[in-house]
Amino acid sequence: MSDAVKKKKKKLPVIIITLVLVLAAAAALYIMAIGTPTGEAKEQIKLGEKYLSELNYEQAIAAYEKAIEIAPKSADAYIALADVYIQMEEYGKAIETLQTAETTVIFTEKAEITEKLEEVKDARIEFLSSLGFDEETASFIPLDAIRFQDHFYYIIGAKETIKSASDSAEAMHGTLLKLASIEEWEFLKEHWALSEDDYYIWHGEYQSEDFEIEYYIIEWFPGYDASLLMADEATWLFDGVIRLTESESYVSGSFWKEEAIDTSKDFTVSFDYRQGLERGGLDGGADGTVLCIVQQKLLGSTAEYMGFVGGDENYGIELDSYINYDFEPDYDYHIALINGTSHNHVCVVEDSRIVDTDWHKLTAVYNAAKETLTAYIDESLIFEEKVSFPKSAYLGVTAATGAGWEAHDIRNFYFEGTTY
Ligand SMILES: [Ca+2]
Ligand SMILES: [Ca+2]
């Protein structure tokens, strides 16, 4: 080994120490310069706090985003921004903000971000469970899914209008509804379950001379019962509505709960219904909807039978929107407990809420000990009647039109009880 090399070797520890000191000083300066908010960034954070105290979320977000732009390596503004999203119940956005921060902030502030991120992830699961999602389903919902009212939307692929509207859930919701109402809009309404309980993929296409749109969207139905089977002419409308019949003559549609229910135990079933839209034909419109508690998942005849299948063991609660003067001349629009056939009204009550085109809620409660079936429209009691169910039955909702017609719509089907 030469002398020159030996000399260099001796000097090496000094060089290393000097280098370490220089690097440490540089790192300290770096942290001071970028890791803590500058005066201007602090001002933006203060501004954000002011807006937040006035519940002006939009301006608060803008201020915090500005602070992040000025001091991207400081944790403060990310955490403040995440807190705004939490207040808005936009947990996905809060998590995304913190995930960005995790890769961006100075290493000394990373632990703070990670801790906050875990906290928000837990809060999101708690929030989703308060909306009716179980933990597994909640884990399917992408962070950037957009919530509007009761639904989450997630655009997989979109062009033009849908994409530009997707910044605001309300704007997107409105745009989709508007597009769905355009005549040339080919609204495919494809849907299929991706997990057990559940959500749908919607696929829409629109083509005009000016532009072309194709999009996929996942719509979640919190608490939605995926075991419902669509049958016959029933279709999904946008926004979770099942249209049992269109406004056409002599059509019928149904949907069914897949498993049989145990009718030796208490159960409750409810759904929202809307009748009377686009009424036309004989005597102004027809025919009505039936909640079926029957022995087979079958659709019966159209018109006055409303799709209800006959048989002594079959019961139904009909929402009758057509007066058949041959066998029901004494009633106006009515709700009735029917048994065996729609002609047999065990109990009948007139009600203007049968066909007023507004949404109403029908609830049926079976008390197994008393063997009674109680019906409510909205919150008001309609009847309580003795029934004699076999030990199991299928639940379905049917509707039909005849020489008169109208649209029959259902949403929010709910069942609580025991299934086989
Ligand atoms: Ca009737
Ligand atoms: Ca009738």
Image (cartoon, helix red, strand yellow):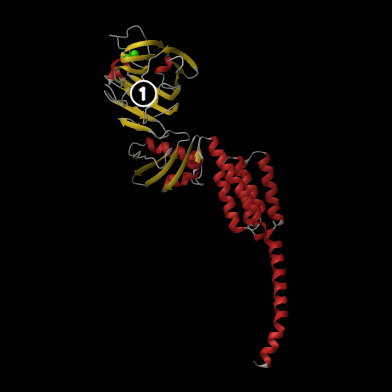
Q: Please indicate whether residue 174 sits to the left or right of residue 338 in the image.
A: right
Residue furthest out toward the top: 330
Judge by depth and name the residue closer to the eye, 307 or 326.
307
- Residue 359 in view (yes/no): no
Q: Which residue is mark 1?
A: 393
Residue 261 lies, in percent from the top left, at 39, 26
Is the C-beta of the residue carrying label 1 under 8 Å from the nearest atom of ligand 1? no
Quadrant location of ligand 2? top left
> Considering only vertical position in the picture, is 179 above or below 11?
above
Tell me the kind of residue under disc 1: Ala
Quadrant, the C terminus: top left
Q: Secondary structure at mark 1?
A: strand
Left or right relative to 400: residue 21: right
Q: Residues within 10 Å of mark 1 (few under 14, many from 20)?
A: many
Query: Where is residue 85 drawn, in percent x and y?
Result: 59, 44
Identify the residue shown where x is 45% and y is 47%: 163
Q: Residue at x 58, y 58 (%)?
A: 103
* Residue in the image at 70% along x and 69% along y: 26
In percent of width and height, residue 43 lies at 70, 51
The percent coordinates of residue 388 (x first, y second) are 38, 15
Q: Nearer the viewer, residue 41 or 231?
A: 231
Q: Quadrant of the N terminus?
A: bottom right
